[in-house]
Image (cartoon, rainbow, N blue to C red):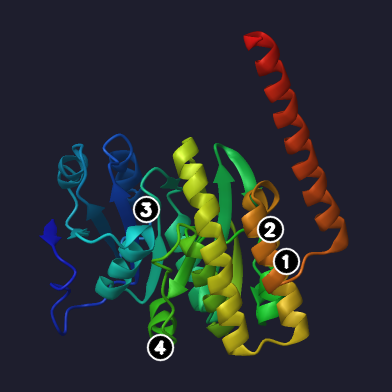
Amino acid sequence: MHHTSVEQISPEGARRPAVSVIVPVFNGEAVIGRCLESLKAQTMRDMEILVVYKPGSDATLDRILAVNDPRVRVIEQNDDSGPGGARNMGLKAARGRYVGFVEADDMVDDNFYEALFRSAEAHDADVAVGEMWENGRPVTLHDGERAISGFAELMNRFVNGASFDKLFRLSTLRERGVRFSERARWEDNLFIVMTARFARSFVTVPGARYRYFPSPWSEGYRRRLERDAVTAVNEIADFARDERLSPEEVLALRGFVLRSFALSVWDDSAVYRTVKRRFGVPPRLAVRHYRKQAKRLWRDALKAVFKGVRHG
């Protein structure tokens, strides 16, 4: 196993694997071993596993180094560029024809990358899209292996802005300068929007399952997500403006934004105002937002009254 910095990427002329898988990790001692074992078990053998490790306060690195697989390379992240920066470091170091991303606390079925790779090759697609399962339940399922193209069609199809249930042609990402945001925790969303804009086609792959195990959000992290959602929405809107999208494309992108930021849009007024200003909000959703805000104000008022009674 290699332990290197991003500057020490593969030597010139080194053989390219079919697939590179990038795994960012920070304080992941309890989960990283399980994640890497699921990657070791892949039926796709022609792959490299790039673990982008940010030093923390636990034994994550020991768990990574304990994995006995020569395909694993460790890249140390020593800056504060966040999860998006970690993925960008992986993209810079990747040697594969295609690249995928796995969260450190998640797993993939044994055939996941082989199924995505074969479908991408068969359809000459820039992106292959698998199925996402959250805590053992399906989130996205495909009714067949279908090629999809066109920005509006792709935006209408996406249920979420995740990058980890997909496989991307690396040359397309590099040629078009597609990168992850390093300014906001919603780093996947801009990446997916850019990819949908520049990719020639996507292909859906039924039966290729990504196993998503979301970690509980602390109150502090939730507040950070709400703040960052404003930045992320503005980044997407700026990209759409620069690309001069058609009205149909803007409408499809708005739907994607509303789905991707649903929790923050309805629970945080700053996010709602940003979405409304940059994309507009359908009337029925505006009513829904203001109803939720009214309920929250009423609930807070009742709490204040009862608190006053108890202390009176």
| Between marks 4 and 3 in the image, the one whose residue lies nearer the viewer | 4
Mark identifier at residue 276: 1
Amino acid at the residue labelled 3: Gln
Residue 116 falls left or right of residue 80: right
Question: For numbered disc 2, what is the local secondary structure?
Answer: helix
Amino acid at the residue labelled 1: Lys
| Between marks 1 and 4 in the image, the one whose residue lies nearer the viewer | 1
Question: For numbered disc 3, what is the local secondary structure?
Answer: loop
Query: At 53% across and 77% down in the image, what residue appears?
Result: 194
Question: At which x and y percent is residue 60?
Answer: 22, 42
Distance between mark 2 and mark 3 Cα atoms: 42 Å
Q: Judge whether residue 221 can be spotted in this image.
A: yes
Q: Which residue is identified by label 3?
A: 42
Question: At which x and y percent is residue 32?
Answer: 30, 42
Amino acid at the residue labelled 4: Glu
Question: For numbered disc 1, what is the local secondary structure?
Answer: helix
In the displayed structure, would residue 195 be above or below residue 55? below
Query: At 71% across and 59% down in the image, what residue appears?
Result: 143
Mark identifier at residue 175: 4
| Disc 1 and disc 4 in contact, CB within 8 angstroms | no
